[in-house]
Every structure is written in C-alpha cells, then in structure tokens.
Image: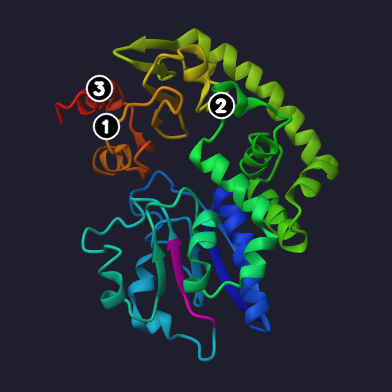
Amino acid sequence: MKIYHIHSHDDADGGIAAAIFQKHIESKYKGWKCRINPQRHNDKELGWALTEIQSPSAILDFTIHPHLLNPRFLKAIEDAPPCFWIDHHPTGSPYSFITPQSLASLAPLLQCLWDTSATSTPGLFRKHYEVLGISKDLIMEYEKAIDIAEIIDGALFVEPDDAYDFSSLAVKVQYLFHPSHPLIQKEKMYKQLVQNLVDNSDIEAIVDKDPVYQATLTYEQERFYQQMEAYKQVCVLKDDIAVCDFSKNPYSYKGFGRFIPYILYPKSQYGLHIFPQKEGFAISCGVNPWNSLQNKKHLGFFFSQNFNGGGHEFVAGGRVNAQQVTEVFPKIKNFLQGAV
C-alpha cells in the first residue's frame, strides 16, 4: 500500500483540513492511502525542524518543514502525489528568507499556498480550491465543516459566553479535537475524528451520535465551570489587559480558558494567560474580539521573536522558563503600548 503522509495542526482547524485533504488525495490519486500525523509545537525550539518526515507529505495549518525545501525529498518517489505546504499563519515559516513570493523559486517542486489573509486552512481551501486542484464538489460537500473551522479560528462568536455554549456545534467540535480528559488518548481521538469526517461529511451527525464524544463533552463542560472559578481567583485587570497568571499558584490551574478573561472583564482590550507546563510556563495573549482596537499590534510576530512561539495578528502563544516568567507582563505591556 502506498502511503501519503498528512501532517496537520492538532486542533479543529487542522483536523477538518486533514479530512478534506485526505479525501482529495485518495480520490484523485488512486492506490494511495493517507496517514494522519497530528502535530503541535513542543518546548524545544527546533523540535519540529528535527522531526523526521517521509515523502510524499503534506503539511497543513502548521509550520513549514525544512525537508520541503530539499529537491531530493520532493522527488523521492516517482508517480507520487506532490508534496504540499498549505497554511494561513503569518508565522508559518521560521526562516526570514521564506516569503509567499520567494517560495516558488526556492522550492519549485513544492505545491505551496501560504495565505495569511485566510481565517482558517479549510477556509483557505474554499478560497483557492482551483489553485490546489481540489474539486468544487468536494468543497461544497464540506461546506458546513469549513464554516465551523472559520467560526472557531476566527473567534466568530456573538458574545464571549457563546464560546462555552455546549449546545453549539462549533464549541463541540473545538473541544473534541483538543480534549483535556486525562484518560483520552488525544492523538487517537484526533485521528478517529478525521476518519469519521472522511467517511461522512455531516460533522453534526458525527458529533451528536457517538456516545464517547458525548461523554467527552459532558466532562469538558464540567471542567469549564472549574476553570471559571479558577480564573476568578487570579484574573485581574491591568492597563486594559486582563492578566490571568497561574505561575504563583500552578495547582489552582484547571485548564486554558481563552475567552474567560473577556467574560470577567468585558471592557478589557487584551487577555494574557500564564499557566504551568511540564517544564516552564506557557503563555498566550489575544485581542478581545468583542472590544478590539482598530490599530492592533501583530502578536504572532512579537511572540515568535520573544517567547519561542507564534500565531496570528490577534492571538499568539509561546513558552518561557521559570526565570523568565516575571518578564512576561512588562514586555507585553510595553509592546502593546508602543514602547517596543
């Protein structure tokens, strides 16, 4: 059996993109089967770059891999589907010499689409399906799933409370692709969801009929109430930034609640989260979608340069060690206020 490898971000955006692309590859290139490899950035700066990947491969909704710049890797197998890199993150490339314009000359054998104006990678598929060679019928078949990815990645909820409304399909899908239950094998559930979506494009039917998924969502809803109480204990408003710092009391942390600061402080313009990891601390900062400024700073680029991270203009994440954690708020405050 001939294997085509799909490396996709381990969230709803990446998972939906992986399902659509798997169906595209397997229907267009007969005899090829896709293997899904969910990816996430780890604590090591070069972790992804040092990860071995096989040819042919597609990287979706994730940072480009140096192998995709190697002509020998791209030519490794005759008569194979081409290698792809498709992403919408402004920090999709850690290499300063790579731009959307330079890739055509740097890697002419690579099928590349890097559109930082797209809200999500499935949305990018819908926008550029002809360039990518994806059939219009396939895009229409997955219209609902693409809309869900756009809502999740664009934070297109009417109010911050809606991001935790577990009757919403977007909320259900978001949690299922990134569950927090300690007994769930996250990679296994991710792959199962992708395959379910390949077999049946009706994402609502998939989510609502599986008892394991329903039990997972019940757990996630209960966990949200615990998160809300934990955030109330630490979240304070400082200079229009809702600061949620769990570094001084890591045992009180009950999980990441991206939009909880905006529920607690609706007039805040930014939300900053600092929370414990196995090694050091993860940090995340975002623009309040319900009270945002017109002249936003580019958080993704700032995090890529300062906190070993990246992301979008309006939300980004990174990591620091225990010695650096006290520097996080002053640095971010200075940047947002224009001093950096």
Residue ID at (46%, 48%): 119
Q: Secondary structure at mark 1?
A: loop
Percent position of residue 323, x then y: 28, 26
Spatial CA span between label 2 and label 3: 24 Å
Percent position of residue 163, x then y: 59, 28
Q: Nearer the viewer, residue 284 or 24?
A: 24
Residue ID at (73%, 33%): 217
- When asked about the image quadrant of residue 210, the answer is top right
Residue highlighted by disc 3: 333
Amino acid found under the numbered disc labelled 1: Asn
Residue highlighted by disc 1: 295
Residue highlighted by disc 2: 255
- Residue span colored magenta: 81-86
Percent position of residue 61, x then y: 48, 55
Counting every numbered tag in the picture gives 3
Give the answer, above or below, for where 162 lies relative to 235: below
Query: Which numbered mark, 1 or 3, is in the foreground of this view?
Result: 1
**Quadrant location of the C terminus?**
top left
First in sequence: mark 1 vs mark 3: 1
Horizontal side of 165 relative to 49 (left or right) equals: right
